[in-house]
Amino acid sequence: MNKDIERIAFTADEIHEKVKEIATQLNEHYKGEEVIFVCVLKGSLPFYADLVREVDFPVTFDMVCVSSYGSSATSSGTLKIKLDSGVSYENKHVLIIEDILDTGNTLYNLIDHFKDKKPKSMKLCCLLDKSSRRLRDIEADFCGFEIPDEFVVGYGLDYAEKYRELPYIGVLKPEVYNK
Ligand code: PRP
């Protein structure tokens, strides 16, 4: 285990099982229809890559890169789209893939942005849900694990761009981010 990790929240095996569970729900929901999977970079990459290989309907890949600005140190109410591939969502099923739903600011603003693209449907799929920190009225349609308000890293999630490559999700030692 990485020396900066206090404890493992979810092992690689537990994550893989959960990804398969979510894929089963998606298979039942979309029933063979084509869906645009939108990867919200960068944290969602491992979840996205694993999930697309578990579903049994046709997937179109898309990705978006966003950043938030505002008065607070955490994510804010204003979203800047840094990368928009230009893929047309008109009359298509769109599934937004996120690693973590926290305050909800990112997805709230992203959904607002995507609505202009006139998709046939738009749903949210998040691996982790930290609902105790929610500031927006937003819920995932498909969700992996509900988690407490702890600083988790790994499987795409970072602290200062580190730990994304860990195959598990771990709770970061407080001394790492309180330095
Ligand atoms: C994380 C995560 C979500 C967002 C969730 O991204 O991937 O996009 O924060 O937080 P919110 O619900 O409070 O808006 P981050 O901005 O850290 O970028 P990253 O994916 O590149 O790590």
Image (cartoon, helix red, strand yellow):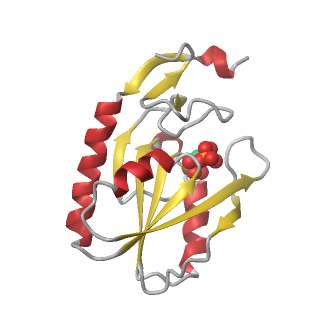
Viewer-closest of 51 and 122: 51
Residue 125 appears in which quarter of the rendering?
A: bottom left
Residue 110 shows in the view: yes
Residue 108 appears in which quarter of the rendering?
A: bottom right
- Indicate left or right for 58 with 130 as reference: left
Q: How many marks?
A: 0
Residue depicted at 42% across the width and 43% down the height: 128
Residue 136 shows in the view: no
What percent of the width, then of the height, locates residue 92?
42, 81
Residue depicted at 58% across the width and 82% down the height: 116
Residue depicted at 47% across the width and 59% down the height: 138
What percent of the width, then of the height, locates residue 97?
45, 57
Quarter occupied by the C terminus: top right
Viewer-closest of 104 and 10: 10
What percent of the width, then of the height, locates residue 19?
31, 46
What percent of the width, then of the height, locates residue 166?
49, 30
Viewer-closest of 119 and 60: 60
- Indicate left or right for 11 with 173 as reference: left
Q: Residue furthest right?
A: 71
Q: Is residue 146 above or below residue 126?
A: above
Q: Is residue 88 above or below residue 43?
A: below
